[in-house]
């Protein structure tokens, strides 16, 4: 089946630095990808929709200048956490919908990236 | 708006016990329903899905039936194993014109943690 990868799987950084997380669809093209944030023992919170060739759509309350999203190609979306602070520490997950007909919007999820900001 | 309500956890069972995790939904349009499973430290994996009323999704001994009359999609397994310990998410996708996928984000329930002991 289709696979979505994320890199890195975990990252530790100092407060004030920027961190880039990559999400790749490995064997299919994804014009749309989604970025979620998950706090411990909680559900996934949709942060933004990444659109190939156009600007990302951010959910209410998500700072677009802090969480920069770039959908550079049909197989790659990146999330950059700028000037990271300890409160940005979280588990970030991306997903991409299946593109074949009659897929009913089934999504493939990446394995997640654990970000820890010191 | 569209939403998913999932039973609160944690659910603690002994091996070979029967499992039910309740999920109900509110949706307009033509909802498709999914169960995803998340093992510790990992992303989400599709467990099963159902795309129309009375459909039964099944996988790895788990089953769920799409009940339009009760707007439910309860997850069941007849005999759980220790390896089933994970967090289970019920999710909803609503597409305006089925079966074509519109690439929208899924709507998730809060997740139910299952812990199975031997």
Image: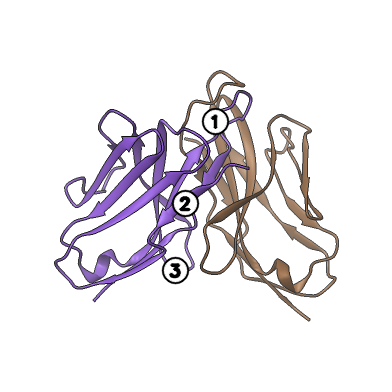
Chain colours: A purple, B brown
Query: Where does label 3 land, which residue?
Result: A40
Check residue B54 in the rendering and tell me which mark sits there, or answer none: none
Where residue A100 appears, as percent x and y from the top left, is 59, 27
Assess disc 1: are there few (<14), some (14-19) or many (≥20) residues with their C-alpha within 10 Å of its C-alpha: many
Secondary-structure class at tag 1:
strand
Where residue A34 appears, as percent x and y from the top left, is 41, 42
Secondary-structure class at tag 2:
strand
Which mark's residue is nearer the viewer, 3 or 2?
A: 2
Give the vertical position of B117 relative to A23 (above or below). Answer: below
Label 1 to label 3: alpha-carbon separation: 27 Å
Where residue B35 appears, as percent x and y from the top left, is 65, 49
Who is closer to the viewer here, A86 or A16?
A16
Q: Are marks 3 and 2 on the same chain?
A: yes
Query: Where does label 2 land, which residue?
Result: A5
Q: Are marks 1 and 3 on the same chain?
A: no
Label 2 to label 1: alpha-carbon separation: 26 Å
Secondary-structure class at tag 3:
loop
Check residue B94 in the rendering and tell me which mark sits there, or answer none: 1
Left or right: B118 as drawn, with respect to B29: right
Left or right: A74 as drawn, with respect to B36: left
Give the vertical position of A104 relative to A59 (above or below). Answer: above
């Amino acid at each position: 089946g289709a696979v979505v990868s994320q890199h890195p799987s975990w990252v530790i950084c100092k407060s004030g630095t920027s961190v880039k997380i990559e999400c790749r669809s490995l064997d299919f093209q994804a014009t749309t990808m989604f970025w979620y944030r998950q706090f411990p023992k909680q559900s996934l919170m949709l942060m933004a929709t990444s659109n190939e060739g156009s600007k990302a759509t951010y959910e209410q309350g998500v700072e677009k200048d802090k969480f920069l999203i770039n959908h550079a190609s049909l197989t790659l979306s990146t999330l950059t956490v700028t000037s990271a602070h300890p409160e940005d520490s979280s588990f970030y997950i991306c997903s991409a919908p299946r593109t074949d007909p009659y897929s009913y919007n089934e999504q493939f999820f990446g394995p997640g990236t654990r970000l820890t900001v010191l | 708006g569209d939403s998913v309500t999932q039973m609160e956890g944690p659910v603690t069972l002994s091996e070979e016990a029967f499992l039910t995790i309740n999920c109900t939904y509110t949706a307009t349009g033509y909802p498709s329903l999914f169960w995803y499973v998340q093992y510790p430290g990992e992303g989400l994996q599709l467990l099963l899905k159902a795309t129309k009323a009375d459909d039964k999704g099944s996988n790895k001994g788990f089953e769920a039936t799409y009940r339009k009359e009760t707007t439910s999609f309860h997850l069941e397994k007849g005999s759980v194993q220790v390896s089933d310990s994970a967090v289970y998410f019920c999710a909803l996708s609503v597409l305006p014109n089925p079966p074509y996928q519109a690439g929208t984000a899924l709507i998730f329930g809060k997740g139910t943690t299952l812990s199975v002991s031997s």
